[in-house]
């Protein structure tokens, strides 16, 4: 304060006054700030400059906008420093400001760029300061140069240490924090400047390899946002050995037991591995086994919830790290640029094209678009990854945290789709599982476990999350994809009668909900019908033998006179469409409410009943469409049922059902009935179909009139243009960076898991979705 009084009282050094000082009241805050800035710029003594900077930093807390308006040139001059060393030709080699001066200047800038809490009538100047800095390339480069170690330029003390070392560490950390703040506001100018400064990446690498624990902790926080969506920076950091250094930090901090330091290091590593070239380097440097070694967990209780709050907090942190590791491994198995939806066999055939016209985007996408990477495959096999992740996916009962199991199931699904040897390894697993309902431990093959989980077996209790069930269904469809023999074997296992009427048998779980489901059962598990149809749709997809086998299946083959399953499904559809028509008028639900389908707790009880009907109806209609597609015997069976045709026509004409995709699916089924009359059939069958269609008043002309009516309806056009269109719930699994699916690649470069499992969209075959879109001209 004495310094301030003498400084203000003297009016500053008149020779050093800037034009901005003219006319200012030197006793006002603005006058003090401006005079302090002038003194910093003109100071020749270290202590004088230090005292002025300390004053400016102190005033920035109370007068942020005034300091921000006037202090940037003074702070920039402080960071400029003086030439520290002359090269042989007399050119300055580098600039070395005093470490303590630079640190205070950086801390002041950090305060100025920190957003203020919202306050009425008070403007926040932090965003303006951030933009002023990032738009000034010279200012940015000065801040970035503060990361230089400067160790060789600091004088040696008698004990061999550098006299200014601790100050320099603190300065580098202040620069890291400031750059991190600026990256969150506008990363692109900083990324451009980093690519133009050849020393910047080297300085980051030096900080990671430095012996300072503080730098090893802070630098990963800078790498994650710096490398995000910038392949050039990702590769530059990788070329400077940052991948191995980050992995070394994770290993040296005891892996999953290392806490936040390991979390930040893995987040930074994940941001680098977004680049295909960096992933190649990671494999070339033989770092993949080291990454997988982090998944060796001796005791699953270390990653399981506990009644002890302290133990739960620690295990939750470890679970987050395990989820990060699996997420990084998934980058090698199925990079985000290939997409999870790619590669599933097409449902579009020449016969359907003749009716519906050209298929936009519906052509066959075979495994060629997802060719196995042999280097990745070798690493997966040598690290025994299917046993490591498979144990987390289907082993250990259900004790471990749900996000780990969900991420492990997705990784298993990704791997089995592409790498056949890994698929065989997983199929051979027979984990010992704890069954809640039976109270015992049994051995169960991995594929049966996937089905039990997806179908909501009572073995695992009512707490089985929707996210885990959806991931299990995805892993199952990956197992059977492209393997008709496996599809038939699984279907046979689903149709095996259960002698003791076991509620957890696969037949009870898979067939029972299609025939009947009480209101109590529907409320207890409204998604059971959905998952059953999802599983069966992938078993039937492109496999006529499975379609024929299921067409001959009865609800209960042990009872004489039992109904065919196909007719039972048709009856359910007729009943549900009638319920939907009644509820549409008595229990209205808006499209906005329907978008909350995965959050039923947001709806009123009456709306909930309607919602459960819509979920079951969409699932059954989609299953029937896949069953009838390119399979004329199913078309004939539908015509034999008769009542379903009129129900489809009536529902297709309804414009007041809130979900327009229910009428759309009805129109699609009617189109499949019309398309079933193709020239490949015997004349007797074609004549029979024609008679049936005439009797039901369903001709090509009637179908196209109904299709036009649907496309012109306001609800359908509104849904197609909505943010969750074109298919909010008849959709395929989102990609790894989708905002609707967690774990995702978050803004800070790290993988995390959503605590809300019901935010997961369910899915049907991606090519069926494309076919559906093409028929209804949604593209």
Image (tube, rainbow, N blue to C red):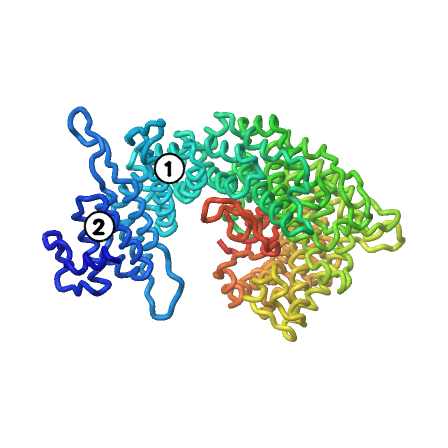
With 416 as the anchor, is 685 left or right in this view? right
615 w.r.t. 308: above or below: below
- Determine which of the numbered discs, if any, sits on residue 233 in the image: 1
Secondary structure at badge 1 equals helix
**Residue 134 spot, x, y in % from top left:** 29, 49
Q: Is residue 82 above or below residue 309?
A: above
- Nearest-to-viewer mark from 1 and 2: 2
Residue name at image x 22 percent, y 33 percent: 84
* Residue with the mark numbered 2: 74
Please give the name of the residue rendered at 78% of the width and 46% of the height, measured from the top-left corner: 435
Can see residue 247? yes
Estimate the x, y position of residue 329 in percent, counting from the top left: 55, 36
- Quadrant including the N terminus: bottom left
At label 1, counting other C-alpha atoms closer than 10 Å, the crowd grade (few under 14, some 14-19, many 20 or more) is many
Q: Position of residue 141 (x, y in %)?
A: 27, 41
User: 214 or 614, which lies in front?
Assistant: 214
Q: Is residue 679 visible?
A: no
In the orientation shown, which residue stands out farthest toward the bottom?
A: 586
Mark identifier at residue 551 = none
Where disc 2 sits, the SS reads helix
* Nearer to us in this view, 364 or 53: 53
Residue at left offset 72%, top offset 51%: 456
Q: Which residue is nearer to you in this view: 165 or 295?
A: 165
127 shown above or below 553:
below
Q: Distance from label 1 to label 2 (Cα)?
A: 31 Å
80 horizontally vs 108: left or right: left
- Which badge, 1 or 2, comes first in the chain's sequence? 2
Question: Residue 249 or 552: which is nearer the viewer?
Answer: 249
Q: Is residue 371 left or right of residue 144?
A: right
Taking the spot 29% from the left edge, 31% from the top edge, the residue there is: 154
Do the residues bearing badges 1 and 2 touch, measured as CB atoms within 8 Å?
A: no
Residue 398 at x, y percent in the picture: 71, 46
């Amino acid at each position: 304060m004495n310094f301030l009084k003498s400084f203000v009282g003297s009016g500053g050094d008149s020779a050093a006054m800037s034009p901005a000082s003219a006319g200012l009241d030197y006793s006002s805050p603005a006058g003090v700030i401006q005079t302090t800035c002038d003194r910093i710029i003109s100071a020749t003594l270290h202590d004088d400059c230090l005292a002025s900077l300390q004053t400016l930093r102190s005033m920035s807390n109370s007068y942020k906008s005034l300091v921000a308006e006037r202090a940037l040139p003074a702070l920039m001059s402080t960071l400029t420093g003086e030439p520290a060393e002359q090269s042989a030709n007399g050119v300055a080699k580098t600039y070395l400001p005093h470490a303590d001066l630079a640190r205070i200047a950086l801390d002041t800038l950090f305060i100025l760029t920190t957003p203020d809490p919202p306050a009425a009538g008070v403007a926040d100047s932090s965003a303006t300061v951030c933009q002023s800095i990032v738009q000034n390339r010279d200012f940015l480069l000065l801040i970035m140069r503060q990361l230089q170690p400067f160790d060789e330029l600091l004088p040696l003390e008698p004990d061999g240490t550098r006299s200014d070392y601790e100050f320099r560490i603190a300065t580098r950390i202040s620069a890291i924090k400031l750059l991190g703040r600026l990256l969150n506001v506008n990363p692109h100018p900083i990324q451009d400047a980093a690519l133009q400064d050849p020393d910047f990446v080297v300085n980051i690498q030096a900080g990671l390899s430095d012996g300072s624990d503080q730098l090893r902790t802070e630098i990963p926080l800078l790498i994650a946002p710096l490398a995000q969506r910038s392949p050039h920076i990702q590769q530059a950091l990788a070329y400077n050995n940052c991948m191995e250094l980050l992995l070394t930090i994770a290993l040296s901090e005891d892996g999953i037991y290392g806490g936040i330091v390991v979390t930040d290091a893995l987040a930074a590593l994940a941001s680098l591995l977004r680049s295909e070239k960096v992933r190649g380097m990671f494999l070339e440097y033989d770092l993949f086994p080291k990454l997988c070694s982090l998944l060796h967990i001796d005791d699953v209780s270390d990653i399981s919830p506990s009644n002890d709050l302290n133990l739960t907090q620690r295990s939750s942190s470890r679970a987050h790290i395990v989820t990060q590791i699996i997420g990084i491994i998934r980058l090698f198995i199925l990079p985000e640029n290939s997409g999870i939806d790619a590669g599933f066999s097409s449902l579009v055939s020449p016969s359907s094209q003749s009716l519906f016209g050209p298929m936009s985007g519906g052509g066959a996408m075979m495994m060629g678009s997802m060719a196995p990477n042999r280097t990745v495959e070798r690493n997966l096999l040598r690290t025994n990854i299917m046993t490591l992740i498979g144990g987390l996916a289907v082993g250990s009962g259900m004790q471990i945290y749900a996000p780990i199991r969900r991420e492990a199931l997705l990784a298993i699904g990704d791997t089995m789709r592409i790498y056949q040897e890994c698929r065989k390894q997983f199929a051979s697993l027979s984990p010992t599982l704890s069954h809640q309902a039976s109270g015992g431990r049994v051995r169960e093959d991995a594929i049966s476990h996937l089905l039990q989980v997806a179908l909501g077996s009572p073995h695992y209790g009512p707490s089985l999350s929707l996210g885990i069930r959806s991931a299990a269904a995805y892993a199952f469809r990956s197992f059977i994809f492209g393997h008709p023999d496996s599809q038939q074997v699984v279907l046979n296992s689903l149709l095996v009668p259960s002698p003791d009427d076991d509620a957890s048998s696969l037949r009870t779980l898979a067939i029972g909900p299609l025939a009947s489901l009480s209101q109590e059962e529907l409320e207890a598990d409204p998604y059971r019908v959905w998952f059953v149809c999802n599983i069966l749709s992938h078993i039937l997809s492109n496999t006529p033998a499975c379609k024929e086998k299921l067409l001959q299946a009865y609800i209960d083959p042990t009872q004489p006179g039992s109904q065919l399953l196909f007719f039972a499904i048709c009856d359910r559809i007729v009943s549900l469409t009638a319920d939907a028509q009644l509820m549409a008028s008595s229990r209205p639900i808006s499209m906005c409410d329907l978008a909350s389908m995965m959050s039923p707790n947001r709806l009123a009880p009456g709306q909930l009943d309607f919602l459960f009907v819509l979920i079951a109806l969409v699932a059954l209609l989609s299953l029937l469409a896949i069953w009838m597609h390119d399979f004329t015997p199913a078309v004939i069976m539908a015509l034999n049922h008769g009542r379903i045709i009129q129900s489809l026509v009536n529902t297709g004409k309804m414009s007041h059902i809130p979900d327009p995709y229910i009428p759309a699916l009805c129109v699609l089924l009617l189109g499949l009935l019309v398309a079933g009359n193709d020239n490949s059939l015997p004349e007797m069958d074609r004549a029979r179909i024609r008679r049936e269609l005439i009797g039901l008043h369903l001709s090509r002309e009637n179908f196209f009139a109904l299709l036009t009516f649907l496309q012109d309806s306001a609800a359908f056009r509104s849904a197609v243009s909505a943010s969750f269109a074109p298919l909010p719930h008849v959709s395929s699994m989102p990609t790894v960076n989708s905002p609707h699916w967690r774990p995702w690649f978050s803004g800070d470069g790290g993988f995390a898991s959503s605590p809300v499992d019901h935010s997961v969209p369910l899915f049907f075959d991606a090519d069926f979705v494309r076919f559906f879109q093409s028929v209804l001209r949604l593209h």
